Amino acid sequence: MGRETKETEENRKTRHKMVVVGPHVSIITLNVNGLNSPIKRHRVAGWIKEQDPTICCLQETHLSPKDKHRLRVKGWRTILQANNEQKKAGVAILISDKVDFKTKQIKKDKEGQYIMIKGSLHQEDITLINIYAPNTGAPKFVKELLIELKEDINNNTIIVGDLNTPLTPMDRTSRQKINKEIIE
């Protein structure tokens, strides 16, 4: 009995030293302004590896739908993308092999302006929307898109991307105005 008590005491001490760390998720987003150059793809792949996020969202990839292979990065097998046939716009979501992500639904447009994925990450349902808003009429585009997707948006929705909209005076260039449409 004395030995059993000693082992129980040691187990209790060990158990109190263990720290439970919940799942950590990091998402990075980048407007790449075209990935048709091998040098640029190499730089972006290096940046992704260096940042080592859970999820990487890219905008303005300028790839065609058949160019998925150009987005390959070692350790990132899950690549979801929305592209335009004319190699303009384009968005992509890359998910690290280090996490258990199960895709349940994908919505995207043929213009390559957005992609929405629903799935589970660490047994938690999430919705991720990656947007590349057009340079002209961006506030209207974003508002209409979010209205269109409102059934899919909830507390576990993450919206990232290049919204091409200055949200505060600090975000704008001298020629951009923050009008009522942007404020809405």
Image (cartoon, rainbow, N blue to C red):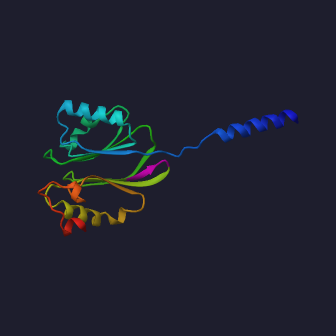
Which is more toward the observer, 22 or 98? 22
Is 173 located above or below residue 79 in the figure? Answer: below
**Residue 171 vs residue 144, the one in the foreground:** 171
Which residue lies at the image location 33% right of the left edge and 65% below the top edge?
Answer: 150
Residue 163 image point, x, y percent: 23, 55
Q: Is residue 119 magenta?
A: yes
Q: Position of residue 101 (x, y in %)?
A: 43, 45
User: Residue 108 lies in what quarter of the image?
Assistant: bottom left
- The x, y position of residue 45, in whole percent, is 29, 33
Q: Is residue 178 magenta?
A: no
In the rendered view, would you say 32 is above or below 126?
above
Q: Mainly helix, strand or loop, the magenta region?
A: strand
Quadrant in which residue 153 is drawn: bottom left
Q: Which segment did they paint magenta?
A: 118-122
Name the side, left or right, on which 72 lies relative to 176.
Answer: right
As drawn, which residue projects farthest toward the right?
Answer: 1
* Residue occupying the point 35% across, 37% down: 51
